[in-house]
């Protein structure tokens, strides 16, 4: 994004945002263009005061660029920071290399210790790992590695998400192996809760499901898909798309529904493009036992997997139901061990 687009993006955000607005910078690698990140942040903060609008900020980074100036800036504007780290050295380096093919793990760890954690509050930092099928069998090692880093450095939490694959690229064997991953993750989750004597909501896979089951409030009532309605992505050239998931589609350019120069009726266009197509529950959802605890299936992910915005991917459904089953098991285990799930434990 160049400065001219950034100026228009600031005007656009000020005009179309509500009283509170969250701005997330993601890439590529946003810190490669730190000048623009700083410009947008400073302008929104300064002019937001005039419009009585409050902005908060987050950034997703590969953790390879950090110095005192950047850290001071992130601290000043109270950024939430998500750093990609896929696990131990060989696992991370297999997927995340420099453009010349060189490994990057050592540099991320160095920056975590000598920059991010030295100048920033570690509780503002989350680690985000992506799990690929070739590493499913090493799940426990990855989980322990991230957990020990979280404890050692005081990070807020870590996530461990499966890489998104179309059903036809994710075999039945991959699915069975991923279910085994979830089983191990559930056991690790329970072990942590037992050792701490409380519900630990900073671990991956289950906390949100457990909270929803406990509250007994169907997710659909609480979390409608926000893409194009209360959430927009401004692309580097000023184009508008619904959410980041859309960028994973091969035809995502066909889904650009506006531009910051011509944004009248933006919400309406967003609603039409994804939400009308996704407004009717498919037949398979009407008879599914998990339907009250299932997020409205993401239209972009549906399209990615099935080429139909409204048709959920069978693999994603299987994974969701497995997570729900383990969440119910965990809730029962915690109840029987008198591990309390009071709101104060959800910090
Ligand atoms: S798990 Fe799949 S089939 Fe069941 S409600 Fe969710 S999207 Fe529909």
Image (tube, rainbow, N blue to C red):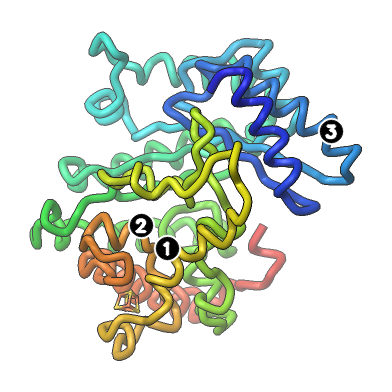
Check residue 300 in the rendering and tell me which mark sits there, or answer none. 2
Q: Nearer the viewer, residue 224 or 154?
A: 224
| Inter-mark Cα distance, 2 to 1 | 8 Å
Residue assigned mark 3: 47
Name which of mark 2 and mark 1 comes first in the sequence: 1
- 130 vs 61, left or right, is left
Q: Residue at x 83, y 46 (%)?
A: 53
Image position of 85 with respect to 240: above or below: above
What residue occupies the far bottom of the structure in this picture? Answer: 287
Q: Are marks 1 and 3 in contact (CB under 8 Å)?
A: no
Quadrant including the C terminus: bottom right
Where is residue 334 drawn, in percent x and y?
49, 74
Image position of 24 with respect to 74: above or below: below
How many C-alpha atoms fall within 10 Å of the one at disc 1: few (<14), some, or many (≥20)?
A: many
* Mark 2 within 8 Å of ligand 1, using the beta carbon: no
Q: Circle 2 — which element?
A: helix
Name which of mark 3 and mark 2 comes first in the sequence: 3
Q: Residue at x 54, y 38 (%)?
A: 234
**The quarter of the displayed image where residue 333 is located:** bottom left
Q: Are marks 2 and 1 in contact (CB under 8 Å)?
A: yes
How many C-alpha atoms fall within 10 Å of the one at disc 2: few (<14), some, or many (≥20)?
A: many
| Inter-mark Cα distance, 3 to 2 | 34 Å
Q: Residue at x 83, y 38 (%)?
A: 48
**The quarter of the displayed image where residue 328 is located:** bottom left
Q: Residue at x 66, y 64 (%)?
A: 345
Ligand 1 visible in quadrant: bottom left
Residue assigned mark 1: 274
Q: Circle 3 — which element?
A: helix
| Inter-mark Cα distance, 1 to 3 | 32 Å
């Amino acid at each position: 994004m160049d400065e001219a687009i950034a100026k228009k993006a600031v005007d656009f955000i000020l005009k179309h945002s509500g009283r509170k607005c969250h701005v997330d910078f993601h890439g590529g690698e946003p810190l490669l263009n730190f000048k623009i990140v700083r410009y947008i942040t400073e302008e929104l903060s300064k002019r937001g005061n005039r419009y009585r609008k409050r902005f908060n900020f987050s950034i997703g980074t590969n953790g390879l660029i950090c110095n005192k100036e950047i850290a001071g800036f992130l601290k000043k504007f109270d950024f939430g920071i998500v750093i990609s780290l896929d696990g131990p050295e060989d696992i991370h380096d297999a997927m995340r290399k420099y453009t010349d093919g060189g490994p990057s793990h050592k540099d991320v760890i160095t920056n975590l210790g000598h920059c991010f954690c030295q100048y920033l509050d570690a509780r503002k930092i989350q680690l985000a790992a992506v799990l690929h099928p070739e590493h499913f069998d090493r799940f426990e090692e990855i989980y322990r590695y991230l957990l020990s880093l979280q404890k050692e450095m005081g990070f807020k939490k870590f996530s461990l998400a499966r890489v998104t694959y179309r059903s036809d690229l994710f075999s039945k064997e991959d699915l069975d192996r991923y279910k085994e991953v979830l089983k191990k993750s559930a056991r690790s989750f329970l072990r942590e809760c037992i050792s701490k004597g409380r519900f630990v909501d900073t671990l991956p896979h289950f906390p949100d499901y457990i909270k929803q089951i406990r509250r007994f409030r169907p997710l659909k009532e609480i979390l409608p898909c926000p893409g194009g309605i209360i959430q927009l992505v401004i692309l580097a050239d000023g184009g508008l798309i619904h959410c980041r998931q859309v960028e994973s589609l091969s035809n995502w350019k066909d889904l650009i529904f506006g531009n910051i120069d011509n944004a009248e009726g933006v919400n309406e266009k967003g609603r039409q493009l994804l939400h009308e197509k996704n407004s009717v529950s498919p037949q398979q959802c009407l008879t599914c036992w998990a339907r009250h605890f299932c997020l409205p299936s993401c239209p972009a992910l549906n399209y990615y997997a099935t080429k139909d915005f409204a048709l959920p991917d069978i693999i994603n459904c299987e994974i969701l139901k497995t997570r729900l089953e383990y969440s119910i098991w965990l809730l029962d285990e915690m109840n029987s061990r008198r591990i309390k799930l009071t709101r104060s434990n959800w910090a």
